[in-house]
Image (tube, rainbow, N blue to C red):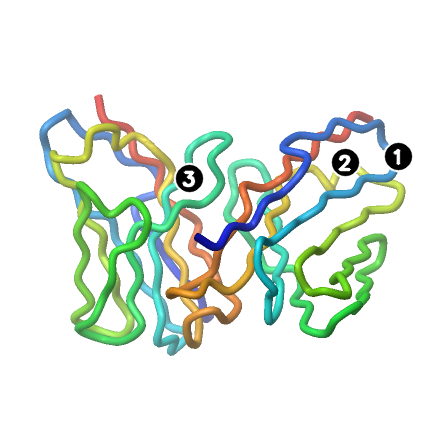
Amino acid sequence: GQQVMQIPQYQHVQEGEDFTTYCNSSTTLSNIQWYKQRPGGHPVFLIQLVKSGEVKKQKRLTFQFGEAKKNSSLHITATQTTDVGTYFCAGPSSGYALNFGKGTSLLVTP
Amino acid sequence: DGGITQSPKYLFRKEGQNVTLSCEQNLNHDAMYWYRQDPGQGLRLIYYSQIVNDFQKGDIAEGYSVSREKKESFPLTVTSAQKNPTAFYLCASSTSRQDTQYFGPGTRLTVL
């Protein structure tokens, strides 16, 4: 079945270092969404990418959608402690809803 | 103030008891979802509903049941048939399936 794979599962960085999480799909996606879940909280929508090769920025966060629309990445420049949390990508399912990746948990040490 | 509410935030139950988790939204969304989250497992879909009086099983529906009698409400019952019910349960809604999902704060269920 349709799968959305995310790597790495965990990442521990020093504050100020960069961070990247990658999302790969076995099939072409019409769009991809990114969510962030803070520790003890609930997932919150960050952004949606639709076009092939699309790049969007939100302050220190850069989101990319691959040319083949099968992969995506989230890059954080100069991490801060406020970036701590789990980042999920999600793509439309052929069945019913969204397929969420298992997430990348980011820990930032001051 | 629009959003999704889930209650209670923490819930404790004895093994063998059924328990119902509440989910209410005032976003006028047609689609609603229930997810289960365990450490390292991401979000696993339990049930979803695209419209009132209609719902479908997700990937891990066994031991759970739902109803969708009103557009605003999508309660989840964790039955005694669910072998390992202790988990964090998240409810979400969207305007239609595959659209951006808005999540409630979650209910952390512990079965003793």
Residue B90 drawn at (x, y percent): 39, 49
The circle on residue A81 is 2
Disc tally is: 3
Which residue type carries mark 2?
A: Thr
Marked residue chain, label 3: B
Vertical placement of A67 versus B58: above or below? below
Identify which residue, B53 or A96, lies in the foreground: A96
The circle on residue B76 is none
Vertical placement of B47 versus A37: above or below? below
* Badge 3 element: strand
Q: What is the quadrant of residue B29 in the picture?
A: bottom left
Mark 1 neighbour class, 10 Å CA radius: few under 14, some 14 to 19, many 20 or more:
some
**Where does label 3 land, which residue?**
B37
Query: Marks 3 and 1: same chain?
Result: no
Marked residue chain, label 2: A
Q: Residue at x 51, y 50 (%)?
A: A3
Is the Cβ of the residue at disc 2 closer than 8 Å to that at disc 1? no
Q: Which residue is drawn at 27% across and 76% down?
A: B51
Residue B85 drawn at (x, y percent): 25, 32
The quadrant of the rendering that contains the C terminus of chain A is: top right
Which residue type carries mark 1?
A: Glu
The circle on residue A17 is 1
Residue A49 drawn at (x, y percent): 69, 68
Which residue type carries mark 3?
A: Gln
